[in-house]
Image (cartoon, grey):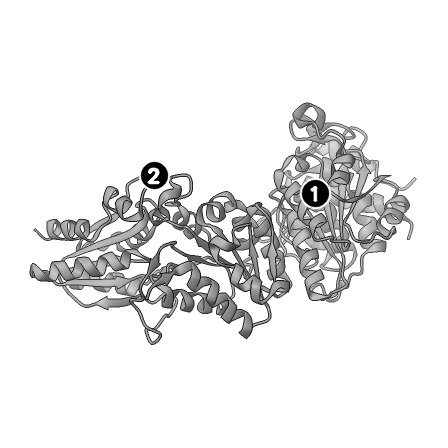
Amino acid sequence: MNYDLKSKELRAEILKMLFACQSGHPGGSLSCVEMLMALYYDVMNIDPENPDNPDRDRLVLSKGHACPALYAILADLGYFPKEDLAGLRQIGSHLQGHPDCTKTPGVDMNTGSLGQGASLAMGMALAARHAGASYKVYAVLGDGECQEGLVWEAAMAASHYKLDNLTFMLDYNKLQIDGSNEEVMSLGDIRKKFDAFGFECMEVDGHDISAVIKALKTPVSGRPKFICCNTIKGKGVSYMENQYSWHGRPMNAEEFAVAMKEQEAV
Amino acid sequence: MGKSLRVAYGESLVKLGAENEKVVVLDADLAHATQTCMFKEEYPDRFFNMGIAEGNMMCAAASFASTGYIPFASTFALFGAGRAYEQIRNSICYTNANVKFAFSHSGLSVGEDGGSHQSFEDIALMREMPHMTIFVPCDPSETEKAVMAAAKINGPVYIRVARPVCDDITTSDTPFIPGKANVMKEGNDVCIISCGLMIHEALKAAKELNKGGIQACVVNMHTIKPIDKDIILKMNKTCKGIVTLEEHSVIGGLGSAVAEVLAGHGGAKFAIMGIQDKFGKSGKPDQLFEAYGLTAAHVVKTCTEMLK
């Protein structure tokens, strides 16, 4: 697969969805595209024909507001028709504003309330361990989300139960709704924090798919994994990049046209 | 010989665990208070202590349910329904996850621990969430039936467990059908609708009222949700008054649930007895029931005045 072309194609889908519903979260959706691509196009053992396959690997998009990126990938993989994407956030559509596993094929868990996804992923990994199942659980966390105490309750439990079938990936774009993490509530050395909680920690460029894949595939034993993925909020749309104001703002027609133009293959 | 409802809960879990290997139990460092330690003793590999982190325990329970297990999560009512409210809402009820909660130390009967630990809000909090079923058992025997019934329901179930020791007032033959109240005593002057430990006071009050020539009916509303609308509307026709009685706030609990059914129907006079928008305090349970107006004598007074 040509990842470069695919990422442009996915970003175009994300932009179309967000423009159509005139709501949603462009910045954080665009920052985790490559992280999700690494998972869905390479690392995860998935079965789009049979989304509830009990042996599948699971993805919990803990930063649930980035679901347009997830939906674009799920549609591309055939979990549901691509035409459905046009219904994002609109009445009658199965594509809710935040992921809903009871409505959307391929969504492994409901998220949206920040912090809960980390905890849910930990619980899935614990249940897998208890069942003797070999599937793996991945959670994509936001950086602002790590201000939630629940993330650390989950981290403590993941380490206590030695869940080496669990990986937390941080979409570290350094921005949140009200501004930078630094201004709002600084995370300090987030990698050291997860290290202190007992995780095997790695750091990569979150837009370098092969680097993300390599980190995901690095074996760990006896403890959970934390991959700090350095990313750019709004990645791929020049005027959105590193702008916290694009966390949750709709594009006007002109902005949309510029953004779409930037997704065209060179 | 009586026993506490939490001991009955612990014993029931062990029994259920023997019948169903999909049952797993989670606790938040209160296994010796909630009595889930009995299950841990018997099935250590199916018991998960999540530490003092109730929200995390609820999400973990949701995930166990998502992979086909039947998790029972226990802590004190305040920390379950209160602190972990939003995890229960978004990670469990929103997806109709098959999680059971049994929260002990509910209501005024917690006693000495005082207001910080006495939950008068848990029924209100749990009741407003779609998909939730709520049982409030009145004695050890009914506690076992509630646990067994909860395991058969596909979806979230809250079992409210009181702390004190009490005698059985139901028997193993007494039916326990979710959503169908039991009439513990017939009567057609006044109907006392109650749940949990307060049923014991309701029965005492009915006996007293009988001496004064008032025939009181006592309804054990062991299921708060879905509530037995039929019996409430029937009592509204056959009795001159209805009094609800609970060790929970008058805002949002059993009384409110009954009022929601009665709204717009006219009929019998109606009063809600419970805790009057106040926090609790330390004391012996009996002293507290006296102080908060929830003894049989208070019920007799309310019923008598209502019928004047």
B1 relative position to A258: left or right: left
**Residue A163 x/y as whole percent:** 74, 53
The residue identified by callout 1 is A66
Local packing at callout 1 (Cα closer than 10 Å; few below 14, some 14-19, many 20+) is many
**Residue A77 x/y as whole percent:** 79, 57
Q: Is residue A134 above or below residue B247?
A: below
Please indicate, yes or no, whether residue A88 appears anywhere in the rendered image: no
The residue identified by callout 2 is B281
Q: Residue furthest front?
A: B1
What amino acid type should be assigned to the residue bearing mark 1? Ala
Cβ atoms at labels 1 and 2 below 8 Å apart: no
* SS type, badge 2: loop
Q: Is residue B81 above or below residue A228?
A: below
Residue at point 56%, 72% (across, down): B20
Local packing at callout 2 (Cα closer than 10 Å; few below 14, some 14-19, many 20+) is some
| Quadrant placement of the N terminus of chain B | bottom left
* SS type, badge 1: helix
- Of residue A60 and residue A199, the one placed in the foreground of this image is A199
What amino acid type should be assigned to the residue bearing mark 2? Lys
**Residue B280 x/y as whole percent:** 34, 40
- Find residue B147 and report its image quarter: bottom left
Residue at point 64%, 44% (across, down): A153
Are dots 1 and 2 on a single chain? no
Q: Check the residue under mark 1 and report the chain it is in.
A: A
- Find residue B199 and report its image quarter: bottom left
